[in-house]
Image: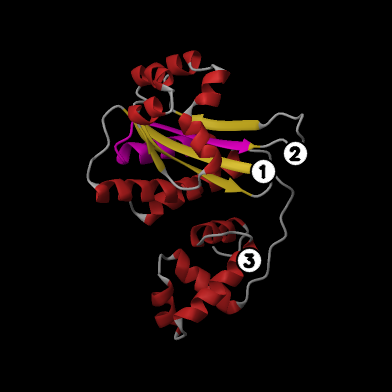
Amino acid sequence: MLLQRYFDVSESADVATFKSRLVQFANDMDFGLVSAMLVVESPTLVGEDAFFSVANAPEDFLADYNDESDRRRDPVMQRLKRLSVPFIYDQDMYAAEDAGDIWEKQAPFGYRTGVAVAIHMPDRRHFVLGVDRERALPKDSSQLSRMMADLQLLAVHAQHAAGRLLGPQDEAEEVPSLTERETEVLKWTMAGKSAWVVSELLAISENTVNFHLRNIFRKLEVSSKHQAVLKALSLGILK
């Protein structure tokens, strides 16, 4: 996928555009179904968590799949609560965890196999992204790895849009101050350059580039280059 396609998702102007771009992205990955959900946990034990989602799920599925006990037993949902890496689900996984009956309910609607990933963020927020289809996934490990990497990168960009478009809005955030060199490093990172390439372009060592990146992560309170670029764009540090 072209890098601009990911930024198109993160920069969606409204919910309809966000959904449309997610669906198109999933279709290009050869998945007919996609769902994205932002979960905001209640700050108290007695409060209720808030859920905000977009999906192209069939209407009949939405009407039928509303059993809370099934959702608690669903092995996909259980994995999403504790994992931060993409994983594949299929009938075998459901059967192995005594949840074959749930798979049987979902399968007629196109939810036979897929890939899902969760991003766990500060302030008790979580973002979940999944793509689903009827046909079995490819057996080739390199194809599967590429598919999972694409979904993980898409999730980083989609959570940026979801937080802006779906969930409750935070108060205006203070813009951290980056040094001129940190900004240069971040601009080249946004262009897709590796730390080694950035070091060559700026005539500094690769270790120095990584030092600046660690400072950027700390100042922006993020944990990856993609998140740093997205947050810098949202704060107006990068244009």
Circle 3: element type: helix
Q: Position of residue 174 (x, y in %)?
A: 72, 60
- Disc marking residue 124: 1
Which residue shows up at 58% across the image and 46% down it? Answer: 120
Circle 2: element type: loop
Q: CA distance from mark 3 to mark 1?
A: 19 Å
Part of the protein shown in magenta: 16-39
Q: Position of residue 79 (x, y in %)?
A: 49, 37
> Looking at the picture, does residue 176 appear above or below residue 208?
above
Question: In the rendered image, which quarter is residue 3 located in?
Answer: bottom left
> Looking at the picture, does residue 229 appear above or below residue 121?
below
Q: Which residue is mark 3?
A: 218
Depth check: give the residue in front, 141 or 93.
Answer: 93
Dot 2, crowdedness within 10 Å: few (<14), some or many (≥20)? few
**Residue contact at pointers 1 and 2, CB within 8 angstroms:** yes
Which residue type does callout 1 highlight? Arg
Q: Which residue is mark 2?
A: 43
Which residue type does callout 3 highlight? Arg
Dot 1, crowdedness within 10 Å: few (<14), some or many (≥20)? few
Depth check: give the residue in front, 21 or 199.
Answer: 199
> Looking at the picture, does residue 164 appear above or below residue 186?
above
Q: Can residue 99 be seen?
A: yes
Q: Quadrant of the C terminus?
A: bottom right
